[in-house]
Amino acid sequence: MFTFLSESFRRRFERISARNLCLYPARYRSRFCNILLFLLFLFPFFSVRAQGNDSDYSKFLHTSSKHASIGCASCHHRADNSSRPSFPGHKDCTGCHLTQFTTPNIPMCSICHQSVNGDDPPRKSFPDKFKESFNLKFDHAQHMSGAARPRSGCTACHSSPLRRGMALSIPSGLGAHDGCYTCHTPNAQANGRDLASCGVCHAQTSYARTPTDSPAYRVAFSHAQHTARQRLSCSDCHNYTPGLAQRRRVSSPRAQEHFPAGNATCATCHNGRRSFGGDLDFKNCRRCHTGASFRIG
């Protein structure tokens, strides 16, 4: 709590305390002297601590206030179409941390290097998993028409196995770069707009994701076609639980409709085969999902 006290303030405190000590009755002088000596004993330790640096340079966090304000390209340079970003070079770090690079007692080198011995210490392997999401953003509406639409349609990104709670499998982790880099190659552009930089998909600020039960997942569904024509009953898709509130007794498939939950699901019939005289290819998500608002954030 004394880290803010300067050397001049400490000396002034000593002079004032010694002068005022004579004004106290004898029975208080002993107690006051003990307190004063204790404080003076602690001052050197607090002074040393104030001159030090409490930052932990053995760890790196993208979410720290200073790092979060820096663009991805400031440290990661995309030289090829590899799905793994490259480690920053020394020049990228010394732009802000020159003092730490010249201070041997601060273990900044251990963030990237396995050891700090030798002229060319080996680097660590690039991590496979991160606790940070890097504010990923994606809009289906921008990928549903023109040159932006993948040739293989929805299956370019979504494929089996099915994943509970969402539509089909959702690309995630570094492996997701492989799918995105099919179109977002280095130096790629569309109508003069950059498609290659990290900021196209990763925002520096927090990005609000669209809930899976949002109208963004609008579904064109006709009960008439699925009951009278397809001879389905309500219980084929909905569960009924007595005792709950009226509006909650009948279960709603929502996003779970792609995953077997005890009753029939969309995937039960829309399984990639033709039936009922129509194309029920489940790979064509737009057969059920319509509207420009179909997007995921």
Image: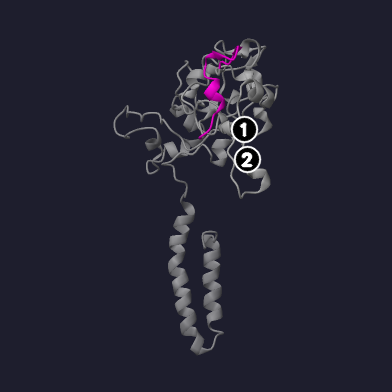
> Disc number at residue 234?
1
Q: Nearer the viewer, residue 249 or 129?
A: 249
Q: Is residue 79 above or below residue 131?
A: above
Task: State the residue in front, 169 or 7.
Answer: 169
Which is in the foreground here, disc 1 or disc 2?
A: 1
Asked if labels 2 and 1 touch by Cβ distance under 8 angstroms, the answer is: yes
Left or right: residue 41 versus residue 182 is left
> Is there any visible trace of residue 273 in the rendered image?
yes
- In the structure shown, which secondary structural element does the residue marked by tag 1 occupy? helix
Say few, some or many: other residues with alpha carbon within 10 Å of mark 2 (under 14 / 14 to 19 / 20 or more): some
Residue span colored magenta: 262-281
Residue 65, quarter of picture: top right
Q: Tell me if residue 135 can be seen.
A: no
Q: Is residue 294 left or right of residue 275?
A: right
Looking at the image, the residue that sits furthest to the right is 292
Q: Earlier in the sequence, mark 1 or mark 2?
A: 1
| x then y, percent, for residue 117 | 29, 34
The answer to whether 210 is drawn above or below residue 293 in the figure is below
Q: Residue 120: image x %, image y %?
A: 32, 27
Q: Where is residue 7 shown, x and y percent of the image?
A: 52, 61
From the viewer's perspective, tell me whether residue 227 is left or right of residue 73. right
Q: Quadrant of the C terminus?
A: top right
Query: Which residue is rendered at x = 52% and y = 66% of the image?
Result: 11
The three-letter amino acid code for the residue at tag 1 is Cys
Tag shown at residue 250 = 2
